[in-house]
Image (cartoon, rainbow, N blue to C red):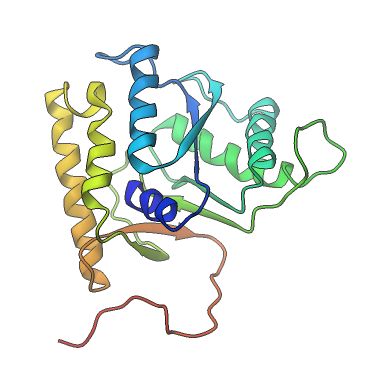
Amino acid sequence: MGGTIARLADQGHDVVLVDMTDGEPTPYGDPQTRSAEAERAAEILGVRRVQVGLRNRYVEHTIEARHAVAGVIREHQADILFAPYPEDAHPDHVAVTKIVEDARFDAKLTKIDLPGEPIYPRWLFHYYCTHLRIIPNPSFLMDISGYESQKREAIVAYETQFVLPEKNRRVVNWVDSAGHYFGSRIGVDAAEPFFAREPLGLTGFGQVVGCTDS
């Protein structure tokens, strides 16, 4: 969802990327390199990042993990949360999504030892980063036209993940292709898909992006 992140930041939203783990071990990386790559990607997108410190490949849905994320939500006073799509072959992704969903609830509790003021984020949206070979069936699409190159630059900032491993270079290309495909569904250059479990409300159709008759 790099294009959406860049667009929201450009619109003046205070966007925070939450690194749940340090991403290690990987064939080409190390904790210091991965952190520098993540920092570079955040700079490209125009946002800041915080780290939770869970163990990569061992992420578990625990009270401690929930409260760590709830603390970030409260410190940031987050109004909108984004988490991975809940159906995934990657155990860490599945655990992270459940952690974030429950941390949203924990963040509003009053008699709990967490930093910041209680808050219940209005929205929780899921982005598609699944390791399953599924075709997204999104609730809505975000127009990211004009932010495609910024998104690509942020992805390749993770050099140990998408540049050095030859087999992973194609990921950048199919992410580009997916963006153009989803953009074509609403008549724009590029878009990103999101899933919402709760309904979105409209007051009219003036701001809805859609295809014109052709």
User: Residue 87's spot in the image, x, y percent?
Assistant: 43, 45
- Residue 106: quarter of image: top right
User: Along the horizontal axis of the image, is 79 left or right of 86?
Assistant: right
- Residue 169: quarter of image: top left
User: Along the horizontal axis of the image, is 139 left or right of 53?
Assistant: left
Residue drawn at (77%, 32%) of the image: 114
- Residue 25 seen by the camera: no
Q: How many marks?
A: 0
Residue drawn at (63%, 35%) of the image: 72
User: Residue 56's spot in the image, x, y percent?
Assistant: 45, 20
User: Residue 21's spot in the image, x, y percent?
Assistant: 48, 23
In this rendered view, identify the residue nearer to me: 209 or 64: 209
User: Along the horizontal axis of the image, is 214 left or right of 69?
Assistant: left
Residue drawn at (63%, 42%) of the image: 76
| Direction right: furthest residue | 111
- Residue 199: quarter of image: bottom right
Which part of the image, by quadrant, shows the C terminus? bottom left
In this rendered view, identify the residue nearer to me: 88 or 125: 125
- Residue 31 seen by the camera: yes
Residue drawn at (44%, 58%) of the image: 11
Residue 117 to residue 60: above or below: below
User: Residue 20's spot in the image, x, y percent?
Assistant: 51, 28
